[in-house]
């Protein structure tokens, strides 16, 4: 895996993108391995007074002492599979950044989505670094500046690596919109560091 560098898609400050972090074959092999072997969840959340299952599947992987949740929902914690632990260690070495958890999203087709949000929970710290590895179908990640409301997007190709860092979560929201004509699935691996709870 190569180090992500300045992105060619002219993304805002706080975002960097590398189209080919994993080869096509490695991306495909890893996609099918995770699709078949991860214990997928579909959490129930409450957003703006509405309660229901999220429009995608998830798996939350972390070190033993880490918990994570959002929208009044706690995720079941799974142990690190060997292949994802190895990827974590390579990312930590390349980016000189620790990671202790991984949220995996499985978009079964273009009807599965992720609404506008920022990863700005207190337990992620004030300037979190979040690394997103994409596998499978290409999806567009939309970015919206919180003040100007200007929207841009980056096309997330299979095997690509997007790094969100600095003030990216303070200044922007991001989302995966519906693509109803898309029949193919996508898996995203989002590595992050969650601050341990004080004793």
Image: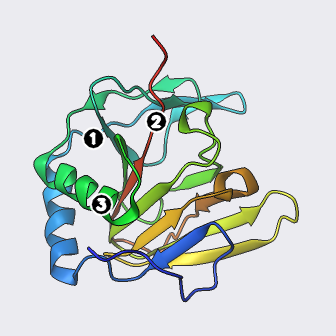
User: Residue lying farthest top?
Assistant: 199
Q: How far, Cα to Cα, is label 1 from label 3?
A: 28 Å
Q: Point out the frontmost of discs 1 and 3.
A: 3
Q: Is residue 49 visible?
A: yes
Q: Is residue 182 above or below residue 175?
A: below
- Count of numbered labels shown in the rendering: 3
Q: x, y (%) of residue 166?
A: 63, 58
Q: Is residue 159 above or below residue 74?
A: below
Q: Is residue 76 left or right of residue 170?
A: left
> Residue 40 bears which disc, if any?
1
Q: Quadrant of residue 60?
A: top left
Q: Is residue 128 left or right of residue 80?
A: right
Question: Alpha-carbon neighbours of circle 3 within 10 Å: few (<14), some, or many (≥20)?
Answer: few
Q: Secondary structure at mark 2?
A: loop
Q: Quadrant of residue 175?
A: bottom right
Mark closer to the chain start, 2 or 3: 3
Q: How far, Cα to Cα, is label 2 from label 3?
A: 18 Å
Q: Point out the frontmost of discs 1 and 2.
A: 2
Mark closer to the chain start, 1 or 3: 1
Question: Alpha-carbon neighbours of circle 2 within 10 Å: few (<14), some, or many (≥20)?
Answer: many
> Residue 194 bears which disc, if any?
2
Q: How far, Cα to Cα, is label 1 from label 2?
A: 21 Å
Q: Looking at the picture, tell me which residue is in the foreground, 66 or 77.
A: 66
Q: Is residue 142 above or below residue 84?
A: below
Q: x, y (%) of residue 155?
A: 51, 79
- The residue at 40%/25% (across/down) is 67
- The residue at 61%/51% (across/down) is 115
Q: Secondary structure at mark 1?
A: loop
Location of mark 3 (residue): 93
Q: Is residue 120 left or right of residue 104?
A: right
């Amino acid at each position: 895996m190569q180090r992500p560098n300045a992105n060619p898609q002219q993304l805002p400050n706080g975002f960097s993108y590398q189209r080919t972090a994993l080869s096509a074959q490695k991306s495909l092999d890893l996609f099918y391995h995770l699709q078949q072997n991860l214990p997928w969840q579909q959490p129930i959340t409450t957003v703006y007074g509405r309660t229901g299952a999220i429009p995608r599947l998830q798996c939350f992987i972390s070190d033993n002492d880490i918990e994570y949740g959002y929208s009044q929902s706690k995720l079941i914690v799974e142990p690190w599979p060997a292949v994802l632990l190895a990827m974590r260690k390579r990312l930590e070495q390349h980016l000189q950044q620790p990671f202790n958890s991984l949220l995996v999203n499985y978009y079964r087709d273009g009807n599965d989505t992720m609404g506008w949000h920022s990863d700005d929970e207190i337990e992620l710290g004030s300037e979190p670094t979040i690394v997103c590895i994409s596998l499978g179908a290409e999806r567009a990640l939309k970015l919206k500046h919180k003040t100007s409301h200007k929207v841009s997007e980056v096309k997330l190709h299979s095997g690509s690596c997007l790094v969100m860092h600095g003030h990216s979560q303070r200044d922007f929201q991001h989302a995966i919109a519906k693509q109803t004509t898309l029949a193919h699935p996508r898996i995203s691996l989002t590595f992050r560091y969650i601050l341990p709870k004080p004793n």
